[in-house]
Amino acid sequence: MGRALPQNSCMGRITIRDVAKAAGVSTSAVSRVFTDGASASAATRARVNAAAKALGYRPNALARALVGERTNLVALVIGQARNVFDSLFLEALADALAKHGQNLLISLVHGESAVDEGMMSALDYQADAVVVAAGTVPLATSERCLRLGVPIILCGRVLEREGVDCILGDNRDGARQAAELLVRGGCRRIAYLGRGPTAYSDSEREDGLREALAHLGLAPVATATVDPDNDHGFAAATTLLSAPQRPDAIFCGTDLIALGVLETARALGLRVPEDVAVVGFDNVPMSAWPSFRLTTVDFPIATTAETVVERIQARLAEPNLPAIVRRIPTRLVARATTRRIP
Amino acid sequence: MGRALPQNSCMGRITIRDVAKAAGVSTSAVSRVFTDGASASAATRARVNAAAKALGYRPNALARALVGERTNLVALVIGQARNVFDSLFLEALADALAKHGQNLLISLVHGESAVDEGMMSALDYQADAVVVAAGTVPLATSERCLRLGVPIILCGRVLEREGVDCILGDNRDGARQAAELLVRGGCRRIAYLGRGPTAYSDSEREDGLREALAHLGLAPVATATVDPDNDHGFAAATTLLSAPQRPDAIFCGTDLIALGVLETARALGLRVPEDVAVVGFDNVPMSAWPSFRLTTVDFPIATTAETVVERIQARLAEPNLPAIVRRIPTRLVARATTRRIP
DNA sequence: CTGAAAGCGCTTACAG
DNA sequence: CTGAAAGCGCTTACAG
């Protein structure tokens, strides 16, 4: 008959039992004092608080999570933040979550397949919700989340799937604004330079450009793809800008690429916007720098993060909400890399 | 006599009990199969694995953490990543931790005082270790960590305190290399532009510059402070560069500031490095861009993150290790913003 | 309002 | 190698 002796009280780990003993009440009473909205007399409250303070007691979040409804853990599955944009989003999300007492668990993901691993790990830790801002979500994994009642919020991509909310910028409309500005500025030979079809937002931006140009009776004169780890598109931009029939404008999938185009144009001795106009997407801080003054489409990161967090709360309160696709409005910021419209 | 019925099996939450039942073994057996190095017969192993797979069972990390030695959670307390550098570090850390099966819990911190909150929250979740890369650690909090056996690793700052490891770049030596390059290039009127004394690394860099110059019989001709949220130092750089006795070189606390100086110099029509040489610190990717070609001191982020993670493992294995202050070597990268040395 | 009891999902000695 | 039992630190009905 193995009789294991209780071995707390070592390691300075103060538990609810220690507080209960010190305060002369039951552990239930202590628990209630530390639970909002639970009933405890003023006297009990005072004694428990005093004892807790004296002992330096803090409830074990893990134990709480194990037994309670929530863990207050939200997982973020995100790719390598080679883009300033991702880091800014991570930050904004952590901030918005903190306002709700929720903590951010990070799953940094390398390949596409790793999204799955990241989500599973989130589930292992019983995250209250998982925010995916990388790659694509395998069907089996999204079903598992659904079955477990863990909301999935997709950022920057759309997946029409029951229970999966999608929050992303209005990429098409941003691209339309850019296209119209370029055309009104006299550009006719407009090229697209982006990260290619693997980047969801990028491809929407490309489609948006294509649609808007079609509306104006035009079409992109070229479409090129960049390896963003590598060179911010210097190589692709060089090819585009050295072509015999050079484009008179390049619309880029991200600001980072657009800045690379600016660099390349400079290196080739081309004037911006006279020889070639350039428009980016995201409006990262650097785009406003005097050296660049990049015309770009502003993507409101803070609003996006707040919308994500609001949606998490809504779903946690009401699990059976129908899935939404929420578009955050984007807004053109005209600076110095496009021609002035009279 | 309240008799609460077990209410698992709802919500699709598969527990160790379900697997045990399906495999016809005890929960202990299942647990052992899922614990590396625990003994289980090949037959048991096979049946348990089959049952687990069929049911889609994954151990609850929270329950494991509650009863086991480790949570495999490492907390990072970090400030607003207004600096690319911080994001890169976060990423590198997440990566290095993943290799050890550890997950990153983020505490984004705004003011100095919030460092305390972030650390306490980490402790609430029973993090195995806490990495602090922001502000300063209150004595009471570091003592609490120590008492609980949770290692603290400081990044980018030094705190001589029992049990607190510090890992940071060799700022002084980096500054020395920069100073020597500038002086050998003919600069004599060298100014410092940084984030001021609140930024630990910055002040070491400033000290390093001062010492190295003193060694060469010189002293900084000016020292200015930048508000990095605001303008990347455009204002401060403008003041410095418009002074009657203009410096012939500016050594900057970070690359971002140095890029701001470059921008400012351009705006003022000054040639770099002929009129003024500029050196940064960190070697962020952008510094290598053709528009900037900034001479800077390389700070190896990946090495730093790996060192942090190694140290965490070492301390977890051997809690009573004496505290260390580990300096990661820095290396000057000469590019186009300093004069060529013959 | 309060305490005893059962339970969250797991692991770890302890006998066998 | 294996299972029964106790326990991790907490919360939540249930009686009182």
Image: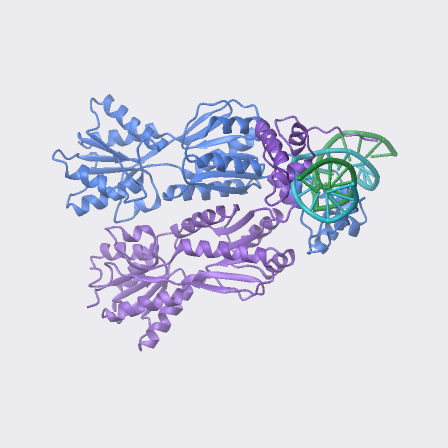
Chain colours: A blue, B purple, C cyan, D green
Q: Nearer the viewer, residue A101 or C5?
A: C5
| A89 relative to A183 in the view: left or right | right
Q: Is residue B48 something that shows in the picture?
A: yes
| A27 relative to B164 in the view: left or right | right
Answer with the quarter of the image where residue B247 lies. bottom left
Residue A301 placed where, x, y %? Answer: 41, 38
Residue drawn at (29%, 48%) of the image: A289
Q: Is residue D4 above or below residue A22?
A: above
Q: Is residue B306 above or below residue A92?
A: below
Residue B24 placed where, x, y %? Answer: 68, 29
Residue A115 placed where, x, y %? Answer: 45, 35
Q: Is residue A37 something that shows in the picture?
A: no
Q: Nearer the viewer, residue B325 or B124?
A: B325
Rendered-image quadrant of the N terminus of chain A: top right
Residue B1 placed where, x, y %? Answer: 84, 31
Q: Nearer the viewer, residue A321 or B305?
A: B305
Residue drawn at (26%, 41%) of the image: A233
Answer with the quarter of the image where residue B266 lies. bottom left
| A342 relative to A206 in the view: left or right | left
Residue drawn at (33%, 32%) of the image: A202
Q: Is residue B97 above or below residue A296?
A: below
Give the residue furthest to the left: A244
| A218 relative to A63 in the view: left or right | left
Q: How many marks?
A: 0
Rendered-image quadrant of the C terminus of chain A: top left
